[in-house]
């Protein structure tokens, strides 16, 4: 299978699993968001270590230690993904599934802004229009919520930064996640022990089923992140932005149809503006890709004639 196609399949798998997460985290109550986050870190490392053990693949570790730039990028990625995980768990378990979906809807526009600010890319006119509509949507939804939609913005910015760091590090998916979770393991274990010392931990107090669900949260975290990492190093950033629509669509459906979150007319207007921005952004991407394909085809034909 071509590497690009394999990357696209990995991306679809990752975003589908992330899109269904709102159905899972409420099952972990009465655990709090920070306790769930700590268990996510611990059991994700266990899952990744198991994958590496089955593959008997440890030779990568020592050479990676000799590459401080890649290690630094992975440490930063670990910190950023912790912020993303914690915010998302809080959002889902506090009844803000729709707002979390908004964060992942606007993430492609955040990626475009990162391209301008960090990579000095130039935006095409329709891309500027899409970004403008995205900003307008944030203003409308700020009016609707009576506050800045900080959950959505935190999720969008943190995941955009995480994707950028992973692409820059260019470390294989499982190995990269192993380093990220290894960075997080000591604070996570420390918090879990602190909770249980104070009699507030839920891992051993809510029955075997609850403990297995907490363990499953780590495994369910590792699998899509491995898929995402595998996609990020194989698929162009623009294509990842298109695939990312899968997750917020599923999250939005979970929030509206299953969690029955309220959607006043002003909120529908704000989301409609976001969807309009994404439609413009997607149309521009497809139009540009077709134009580039025609140019390559013409150049190939010309080379054939000259030859």
Image (cartoon, helix red, strand yellow):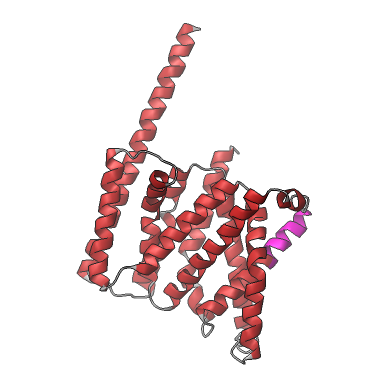
Residue 271 percent across, percent down from the top left: 28, 61
Q: Quadrant of residue 295?
A: top left
Residue situated in front as seen by the camera: 114 or 263: 114
User: What residue is at 31 percent from the left and 38 percent from the top?
Assistant: 124
Q: Is residue 38 above or below residue 128?
A: below
Q: How many marks?
A: 0
**Figure quadrant of the N terminus:** top right
- The overriding secondary structure of the stretch rendered in magenta is helix
Q: Is residue 50 left or right of residue 217?
A: right
Q: Is residue 285 above or below residue 271?
A: above
Q: Is residue 32 left or right of residue 152?
A: right
Verify whether residue 290 appears in magenta: no
Q: Which residues are magenta?
A: 46-56
Residue 38 percent across, percent down from the top left: 59, 74
Residue 160 percent across, percent down from the top left: 45, 55
Residue 101 visible in the current orientation: no
Q: Is residue 105 above or below residue 230?
A: below
Specify the farthest residue to the top: 306
Residue 152 visible in the current orientation: yes
Residue situated in front as seen by the camera: 206 or 266: 266
Residue 226 percent across, percent down from the top left: 60, 56
Specify the farthest residue to the front: 68
Q: Is residue 191 above or below residue 65?
A: below
User: What residue is at 56 percent from the left and 79 percent from the top?
Assistant: 35
User: What residue is at 66 percent from the left and 70 percent from the top?
Assistant: 185
Verify whether residue 49 appears in magenta: yes
């Amino acid at each position: 299978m071509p590497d690009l196609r394999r990357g696209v399949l990995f991306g679809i798998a990752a975003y589908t699993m992330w899109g269904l997460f709102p159905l899972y985290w409420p099952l972990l109550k009465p655990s709090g968001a920070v306790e769930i986050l700590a268990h996510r870190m611990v059991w994700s490392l266990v899952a990744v270590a198991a994958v590496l053990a089955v593959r008997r693949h440890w030779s990568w570790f020592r050479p990676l230690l000799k590459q401080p730039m890649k290690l630094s990028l992975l440490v930063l990625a670990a910190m950023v993904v912790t912020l993303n995980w914690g915010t998302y768990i809080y959002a889902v378990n506090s009844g803000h599934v729709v707002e979390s979906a908004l964060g992942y809807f606007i993430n492609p526009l955040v990626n475009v802004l990162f391209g301008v600010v960090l990579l000095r890319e130039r935006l095409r006119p329709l891309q500027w229009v899409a970004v403008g509509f995205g900003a307008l949507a944030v203003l409308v939804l700020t009016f609707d919520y009576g506050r800045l939609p900080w959950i959505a913005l935190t999720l969008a910015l943190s995941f955009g930064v995480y994707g950028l760091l992973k692409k820059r590090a260019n470390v294989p998916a499982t190995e990269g996640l192993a380093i990220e979770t290894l960075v997080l393991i000591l604070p996570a274990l420390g918090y879990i022990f602190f909770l249980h010392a104070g009699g507030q931990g839920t891992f051993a107090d809510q029955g075997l089923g609850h403990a297995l669900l907490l363990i499953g949260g780590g495994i369910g975290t590792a699998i899509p992140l491995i898929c995402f990492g595998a996609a990020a190093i194989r698929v162009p950033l623009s294509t990842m932005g298109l695939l990312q629509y899968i997750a917020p669509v599923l999250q939005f459906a979970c929030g509206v149809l299953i969690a029955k979150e309220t959607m006043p007319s002003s909120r529908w207007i704000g989301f409609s503006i976001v969807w309009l921005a994404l439609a413009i952004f997607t149309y521009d991407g497809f139009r540009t890709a077709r134009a580039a394909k025609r140019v390559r085809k013409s150049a190939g034909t010309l080379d054939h004639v000259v030859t």
